[in-house]
Image (tube, helix red, strand yellow):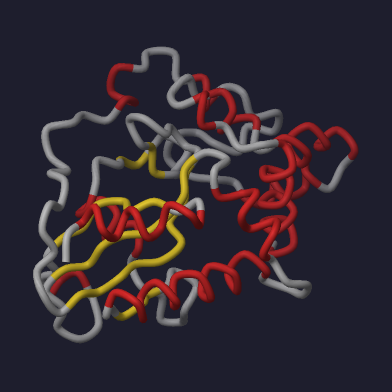
Amino acid sequence: MHYETIAARLAPLGLIARGGFQPEAADGVPGDPAVVVMIGNAGPAMWPVFGAQRTPGPDAMNRWSRQAIDAVATELGAAALYPFDGPPWYPFQRWAQRAEPVFPSPIGMLIHPEHGLWHAYRGALAFDAAVEGLPDPGGVASPCESCADKPCLTTCPVGAFDGKAYDMPACAGHLRRPEGADCLDLGCRARRACPVGREATYLPSQAAYHMAAFLGSC
């Protein structure tokens, strides 16, 4: 199996292959696979595909992700793993940092040098055999290291981020008030303030979907 073959199979779904790694015991990957390839989305490419294929009911994004990635896994002879299967939850953020150059940002989300904060992980494929052509995740620094202003820490209307912790009750309370409509309709204001990857910003309807899902989980 070649990495580009996986990427090409995911492309019609608006999904992307997001690097891979050879698991070690500390990674907590089930079974004994040779390689894990991360799957996710960046920017708005996935949104119209999801919109055309989604089915009514709760957890529509997770259900669509499972349906789409399960089909790819079956076709490619891999086992599918998901961040929403649990508890116990798979350590997807740890896996992501093993697979590609993503780094914890001051507001907690992983930042990508190209996509900024506008990306997510939808699943992973575990292969029993080697995958050729895996990209090298090393040699790239976090874009936050060279960001002097860090507007993500000063833009939140209720100061939910201080670079060390996230005040979720304050954030959720703001979203439930009329003055929180900007964040609820267009996406987190702190997230939007990041100068990295602005061309990958989610569409308003996409951002609003995720914000509504977040608020519903609080």
Residue 9 as seen in the image, left or right of residue 1:
right
Residue 122 higher or lower than 129, as above or below: above
Looking at the image, which residue is at 36% across and 73% down? 90
From what the image shows, is residue 216 above or below residue 146? below
Point out the residue furthest to the right here.
178
The image shows residue 121 at horizontal and vertical percentages of 43, 56
> Residue 188 sits in which quadrant?
top right
Image side of residue 166 versus residue 25, left or right: right
Image quarter hosting the N terminus = bottom left
Classify residue 217 by image quadrant. Answer: bottom right
Q: In which quarter of the image is the C terminus?
A: bottom right
* Residue 191 percent location from the top left of the image: 56, 33
Place of residue 15 in the rendered image (x, y in percent of width and height, measured from the top left):
45, 54
Q: Quick check: 105 left or right of 151? A: left
Count of picture labels: 0
Q: In this view, does 167 lie above or below 158?
A: below
Residue that extends furthest to the top in the rendered view of this protein: 148
As drawn, the residue found furthest toward the bottom would be 31
Which residue is painted at 48% across and 19% down in the image?
195
| Residue shown at the point (72%, 35%) measured from the top left | 186
Residue 110 image position (x, y, % from top left): 39, 43
Q: Looking at this view, is 185 or 13 the one in front?
A: 13
Give the vertical position of 6 relative to 88 (above or below).
above
The residue drawn where x is 27% and y is 80% is 77
